[in-house]
Amino acid sequence: MFVIGPVIEVYLAKTLLKFNRCLDLLQGAIFVKTYAARMKAFFLILFGGVITGFFMLGCQDSGQHPAGQDKIQVKVPSFHDGRYRLETKTLDTVHDLRQLRGEAARFLYAPGYENGQLVGQEPRLRFMKNKDGVYVAQDSLSLQLITMYAQLEELMKLDERLGIKSLNQWPRLVAYNVQVTNGDPRMKYNNALYSGQLDSFLFVPYTRSELPLAVNAGVVAHEHFHSLFYKLVLKKLGGFFVQTSSTELHQDAVVTSRIDEKRSSAEVYHVSLLRAFNEGLADVWGWVATGDSDFVNRSLGFEKARGMDIEDRSQIPTASEWGEKIQGLSMSDAIDLSYPLGAQYAKLIKQTTSLRINRSTKHGDNQAEIRFETAVALIRTLAGLKDAVAQLGKGELLRPSILLEILSRELPGMDSKICKDLSLRTQRESAAKICKNQKEGG
Amino acid sequence: MRRISGALILFTLLGVSSASAVERSVLTSQKVNSSSSRITVGLGLDVRMERTEEQTQKSQNFSQVLVGLERERFGGWIEYGRSPLLTSGNETLKVQRQSENILMAVSVRANDLKVVSPYLAIGVGGLREKVETILYQDVSAEESGWTFLGMGAFGLRFWPDSGYLISTELRVLESTQLDPNPTFAGALHLGLVF
């Protein structure tokens, strides 16, 4: 103890002396006496700041999509469990996030129309990357378009699963903020349409306070179905059917510029009836693809009557009843009446499918899979419908119930009770043909 | 970005080496007027062009606060700037965005002009974005990391020897988070010099 103690004391004293010398040097450094020395200190600090900045900031991801990396995560509104909420989705096919180019869709902002084509610029969008590496839209336009892209990517995958992806040209062309300068003024706002001639989706400005049409997955799926109907039915039939291939979500806005008003009553009959089929099946497709049976109402609250869960026990009209209804009307007026009939079809098909779902889920079957089976049946129905129209004899009128007759044969799981319920909704002339395996010549 | 950072590193290295050379040459003459360094404090407005949703360009105002040090012709400052809250969308789906930046800058000006003295400045810093997305009643608040921001500027300092900071600048800002990039901006600084 007497030996170690002094040794420790000497060691501590020497250490303290060295510490004091360091303090002296530090004090000397703080009070720099020359101007040049101060500037050297200044530049050293700046140098340190630049180096620090370079390493801490310069290598940060700017939020721009790295080239060559297709999988990215984005935060978008998504329909789930009966409502829309913000969710993180993985997109597999985006090549360029800033101009939103990818395998599923490409966009034009407020395009013009020249030589039968849409011409215009691709919008430049704004995204940032959050701390989890998820891309977040920084304005409403970017959010709407990236949401629509995500929906179209899902629809592309559905088409691929159904074996119909090659029917359409991908990426799909979407025109956003289309400025309608002539034609029906009701077309200018709050609407979305598919044009068969342009093979494009057109979204006019949305001015309501509800869910924007571009974000509404059911609406995008509805418009996408019009492209399938056009490719599988109207285009194959040719003639005047092709000229009336621009269809809209909202019934009050009808494209009249391409419709030849001087038509025979048979043409008016068939065009309006096919429009009813098109709109009704498109509504069903909107539900099948998204699970949302009330998607129209979410963006267009005045279209509450189109909700597919609203019970409708009315009967589908006969051919003569439909003929009487549109008797003497112009083409555009007849097409106006197609939308309520289309809504009737949609409710009926949804209710029929719901009965199937109720029976199947008791056995543990997946609702999404049953909706997929319905999608398969709808595609097969389109082929049958095209054949039914093509086989019409001269002067013969297509039965309005033929859609249900063909669909009932294609839908799986149609037991006798469901078939009977469906047949009660058609007129006597058609009731016997529901769920029956027989060729229909019209 | 690499070129700008490399240029800045070279600039500071040159500054260090030249200052060291000067220091060695005057090391014997220790007396220096140490009282001519001044502190600047001020507020500023940075008006920069930004692309809008309508695909046009519109000016965006950034409020700034800055603090700096200057001596004779040389100066440096740190500034913090923030944009107002920008809102787009409708009652059901709305996006609110706000940007903020921090900049460290150095400047050199003509020393012999007493009323209006032009100067050049360069700076580096960071830009950060905050976004709030509102869908019905769901609110999602997100923040980006800091992204590199570079600045070059030509400015005019008014009455540089007075106790007031009055200057205007024409700036070029570079950051991959800006659109357009680079962005032109005008800045106005007002403050006091101690």
Image (tube, coloured by chain):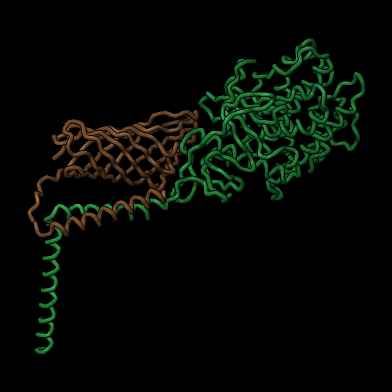
**Left or right: B148 as drawn, with respect to B194:** right
- Residue at the image position 12 percent from the left and 59 percent from the top: B27
Residue at image point 15% right, 58% down = B25
Location of residue A297 (image quadrant): top right
Residue most extreme to the front: B25
Viewer-proximal residue among A136 and A359: A136
Q: Is residue A25 left or right of residue A151?
A: left
Q: In brown, which chain?
A: B
Tell me the quarter of the image containing the C terminus of chain A: top right
For the N terminus of chain A, give its image quadrant: bottom left
The quarter of the displayed image where residue B167 is located: top left
Chain coloured green here:
A
Q: Residue furthest left?
A: B31
User: What x and y, as percent, mark residue A397?
Assistant: 87, 21
Of A363 and B188, nearer the camera is B188
Q: Is residue A311 above or below residue A58?
A: above
**Whole-percent x, y for residue A404 in the image:** 80, 31
Please give the name of the residue rendered at 70% of the width and 35% of the height, measured from the top-left corner: A285
Q: Where is residue A302, by image quadrant?
A: top right
Q: Is residue B118 above or below residue A342?
A: below
